[in-house]
């Protein structure tokens, strides 16, 4: 018994509408739609267990990168077992965190007696900030040719930028 997830999500978003920016509201609405698709709008909020939340976490982790583009499919049909086609751990974590925030709110406002998502999280591995170079660096000779071009040393006129001259534009 008690409130249904769909009704609680509507109340949560209505309350958030007063304090969130339009962009945050849109983002949270989309993320909660994933949760409602998984659990169902008509499910009683009090019946969600930690096991259910772990199942949701794993389902979010298996979502296809383009899950938003698939219209009319169920949560299960939007998932993939191919790791290279799945959401990144960071994106899955962002989606899952909105579910946790929603359940925290429901517990704080006494809609549910306990928060089943308290200690459950998506593990995000550390990624290197430094990426491998995608191209080779310029050689000193190439840089010399580049910066000795009339665009840098002076050109004849704005219509004749490739002919050497005394006009230098500093923009």
Image: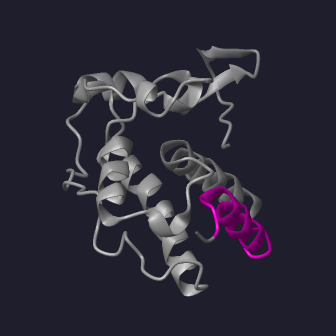
Residue located at (75% from left, 22% from top) = 158
Residue 111 is drawn in which quadrant?
bottom right
Residue located at (33% from left, 26% from top) = 80
Residue 131 is drawn in which quadrant?
top left
Tell me: 60 left or right of 51.
right
Q: Position of residue 60 (x, y in %)?
A: 38, 44
Q: Nearer the viewer, residue 72 or 82?
A: 72
7 inside magenta stretch:
yes
Tell me: 108 left or right of 168.
left
Residue located at (51% from left, 50% from top) = 35
Q: Nearer the viewer, residue 95 or 150?
A: 95
Q: Position of residue 57 (x, y in %)?
A: 34, 52
Q: Nearer the viewer, residue 56 or 24?
A: 56
Which image quarter is the N terminus in? bottom right
Q: Would you say residue 135 is visible in this rendering?
A: no
Q: Is residue 97 above or below residue 150?
A: below
Q: Is residue 111 above or below residue 1?
A: below
Which image quarter is the C terminus in? top right
Instruction: Look at the image and give the residue range highlighted in magenta.
Output: 3-20
Magenta-drawn stretch, dominant element (helix, strand or loop): helix
Tell me: 125 left or right of 155.
left
15 inside magenta stretch:
yes
């Amino acid at each position: 018994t008690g409130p249904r997830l769909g009704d609680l999500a509507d109340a949560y978003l209505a309350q958030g509408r007063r304090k969130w920016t339009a962009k945050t509201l849109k983002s949270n609405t989309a993320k909660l739609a994933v949760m409602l698709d998984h659990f169902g709008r008509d499910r009683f909020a009090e019946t969600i267990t930690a096991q259910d939340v772990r199942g949701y976490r794993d389902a979010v982790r298996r979502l296809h990168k383009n899950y938003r583009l698939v219209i009319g499919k169920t949560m299960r049909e939007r998932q993939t077992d191919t790791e290279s086609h799945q959401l990144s751990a960071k994106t899955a974590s962002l989606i899952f965190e909105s579910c946790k925030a929603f359940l925290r709110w429901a517990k704080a406002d006494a809609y549910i007696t306990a928060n089943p998502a308290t200690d459950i999280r998506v593990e995000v591995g550390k990624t290197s900030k430094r990426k491998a170079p995608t191209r080779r660096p310029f050689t000193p000779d190439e840089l010399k040719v580049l910066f000795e071009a009339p665009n840098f040393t002076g050109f004849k006129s704005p219509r004749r930028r490739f002919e050497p001259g005394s006009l230098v534009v500093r923009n």
